[in-house]
Amino acid sequence: MTYKTIFATLCATAVCSSAVAMETDRFRSIVADTVSQLESGQVDADALISLQEELVRIGVDGAREHASEVPDDATVLNHVADSAVAMKGMDLDGIEAAWHDGEAFEAIGINIDDYDHFSPVLGHVDAIVHPATAIIALRDYKETGEKMYLLQVKDELAEVIEHLAHID
């Protein structure tokens, strides 16, 4: 998926989506702003980290609300929401193993692969995990200046946008 396609999808879904507790319109707007800044070449890592922090907050709020409405999903969603602050402090390898590969869920007896990849529950999980990963990549970019970290930020946000469409 190209970044222009992501931007077009963001615009189209923002127009069509209704406001929900997760603030999906705001989430999409922040993603669009982030991608726009990354593509401009004028990267303010601190400003982008702040935007990703807001995405994590929106994701946590949405996960908690969904957990309260769908008790069967509460264990997974409360676990990821409760872990959001700690995951932002991880390194890229650590967050990949724990949250992208599912080790953090296995630790509480849940096989995250039992959920449909595009289920609302994984949409809410990804709305926290991918922005948290973007924060880590932006921190690494800020420390090293290596542009590969900016590409990772784009990839993380592209993936979460796909999942956002499946959140009620």
Image (tube, rainbow, N blue to C red):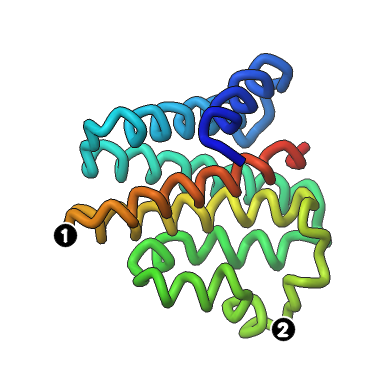
State the residue at coordinates (49%, 66%): 83
Callout 2 amino acid: Gly
Q: Quadrant of residue 40?
A: top left
Could you tell which of marks 1 and 2 lies nearer the N-terminus?
Answer: 2
Disc 2, SS: loop
Q: In this rendering, would 159 be left or right of 121?
A: left
Q: Position of residue 16 (x, y in %)?
A: 73, 17
| Residue receiving disc 1 | 143
**In the rendered view of the protein, which quadrant contains the C terminus?**
top right
State the residue at coordinates (41%, 49%): 153
Q: Quadrant of residue 144?
A: bottom left
Callout 1 amino acid: Glu
| Residue receiving disc 2 | 109
Q: In this rendering, would 1 be left or right of 122?
A: left
Alpha carbon distance from label 1 to label 2: 36 Å
**In the rendered view of the protein, which quadrant contains the N terminus?**
top right
Q: Return the mark for residue 157.
A: none
- Given contact means CB atoms under 8 Å apart, are the residues at marks 1 and 2 in contact? no
Q: Position of residue 158 (x, y in %)?
A: 56, 43
Q: Position of residue 47 (x, y in %)?
A: 25, 36
State the residue at coordinates (62%, 36%): 22
Above or below, comparing residue 143 to residue 158 in the picture = below
Task: Please rate how many residues cluster around mark 2, counting C-alpha atoms within 10 Å: few if below 14, some from 14 to 19, many from 20.
Answer: few
Q: Position of residue 112 (x, y in %)?
A: 73, 71
